[in-house]
Image: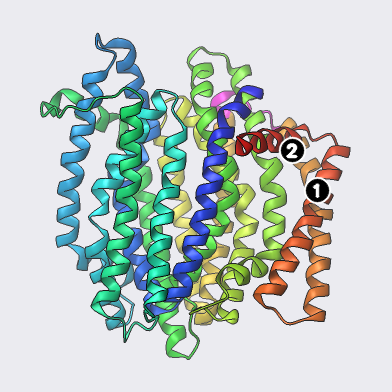
Amino acid sequence: MSRLLRASAIMAAGTLVSRLTGFLRTAILASAIGVTILGDAYNVAYTIPFVLFDLLIGGVLSSVIVPAILRHHKEDADGGRAYEQRLLTAAVVGLTLVAVVAVLLSRPLVVLYADDLAPRGLDTAVTLAQLILPQIAFFGVGAVAGAILNTRDRFGAPMWAPVLNNIVVIGVGVAYLLRDGTHDVDTVTRSDLLLLGLGTTAGIVAQAIVLIAALHAAGFRFRPRFDIWRAGLGELTRLAVWTLAFVAINQVGFVVTTRLATGAGSLAAADGVDGRGLTPYSYAFQLFQLPYGIIAVSVITAMLPRLSVFVRDGEFDSARAEFASAVRMVSSVIVPAGLLLMVLGPSVTVLIFGRGAVSTEQAIYIGHVLQVFGVALVPFSIFQLLLRVFYSFGDTRTPALIAGFNVLVNAAIGITLYFTLPPEMVVMGLAGAFTVTYVAGSALTWLLASRRIGGLGGRLVASGLSRMYLAAIPAALVALLVLWGSVRLAEITAITSAVVLAVGGGLGGAVYLFVAHRLRIDEVGSIIGMVTRRVGR
């Protein structure tokens, strides 16, 4: 466990700062452009480059490209240097072409995700997409540079570079506020959109520059190699076909959710209720991802190489122990975080979003969506860990088939709720559909993964989880009591929300740590101590 903690702590520290600056970025943008139609248009345009990147390369980085680079490090006479240069050249050329084509097809891309937006909102989303889509090239090249850094055990820059991206966009949001930019889609100007679009792209450019500079500092010297066919792209494609299918299937689900959320927001706005569309869903999901991104992603990144070695060598007992250790480590933070989100969600969102163009009522609604997402935090995190069992076997087919099951369940529930719930409640329903999907998906995935590896230490994991919930439930009750007292004494504002979070969250956290210590949940003290030491350096 100590090795896993050491390997993941530096990533957790970088991710923590990245996520916190990301929330500051989101809060400032929300204050500037609001959570209504303009906010939805921006979020649609902002999301498309990430979707295209995932479809083209993002999903295969860890499962295919990183192992391929490591193999060439070992097998090639030059230590894989030429292979890396060809790979980076292919990324520069290919993703630049993709960015150009995406800009030319910006309108159909936006229509795919948000054809239910009001006409002015749709036009605004298209304009923003044209300004933001060029970042695909920079984002992709930076990601490949980050993958090469990871193969050299340089984890810091890939985890810290997004902080600069966030700082740049925070500056854009502040500039928008200072120039009194509008949050009304009907009055937004071309110069407003230029600032938002080009500023967002500038953040990704800065992030890519940092990663390329870090790669240079690590000793890598880039020389364009246009004999790209020697990079084994055909081999990579064959290996990645099921990973690409996994990403594509998930994106189908994302398209369905986005269309339902934007449609519900437009219907609710027509009924006189603003701020019930895609933007509340996106902001709540971003907050939901904070504990997962800080802890689970770091542990997963550190776990997979070791798990793969155990599976390769047939040491299944060690593989099971590694997996069970990772689940307990992640759950020691995820379990209390999920329960506290269910209690304190509105306090979090009022504090972060309840100002500027976002009303307190709209911020509270984002908090209600976040509360529903909180239920999904544990099953979602365990599901992601379970997928790495299949990846350690080189099996990308089973995760793709499981993704198909998840998308069908999520889409069926989401579409049903879209036509049965009032429009202003649909986004909360979509968060509920996400929760049910990952409860069912994690149960199915556990069954399949357990059969593959001959058991996953279920009793050990269940014992650890039960003790964590025993420690977390009193913590959540303490936070709920503080929230109840606050609501009875004062109206909900950013100040009272800050007090609730400080007192309720602080006392709840202290109760959890105390009970966890009494129940001898060793993972709690270990992971907090390691991350604290790394942050302090």
> Which of the numbered marks, if any, corresponds to residue 512?
1
Q: Is residue 233 visible?
A: yes
Residue 526 image-quadrant placement: top right
* Above or below, comparing residue 285 to residue 267 in the picture: above
Crowding around mark 2 (Cα neighbors within 10 Å: few <14, some 14 to 19, many 20+) is many
* Cβ–Cβ under 8 Å for marks 2 and 1: yes
Q: Which residues are magenta?
A: 451-458
Secondary structure of the residue carrying tag 2 is: helix
Q: Is residue 453 magenta?
A: yes
Percent x, y for residue 183? Answer: 40, 80
Percent x, y for residue 501? Answer: 72, 63
Residue 456 image-quadrant placement: top right
Residue beneath the point at 47% across and 61% down: 25
Secondary structure of the residue carrying tag 1 is: helix
Quadrant containing the C terminus is top right
> Which of the numbered marks, if any, corresponds to residue 443?
none
* Above or below, comparing residue 48 to residue 535 in the picture: below
Residue matched to label 2: 524
Q: What amino acid does circle 2 point to?
A: Val
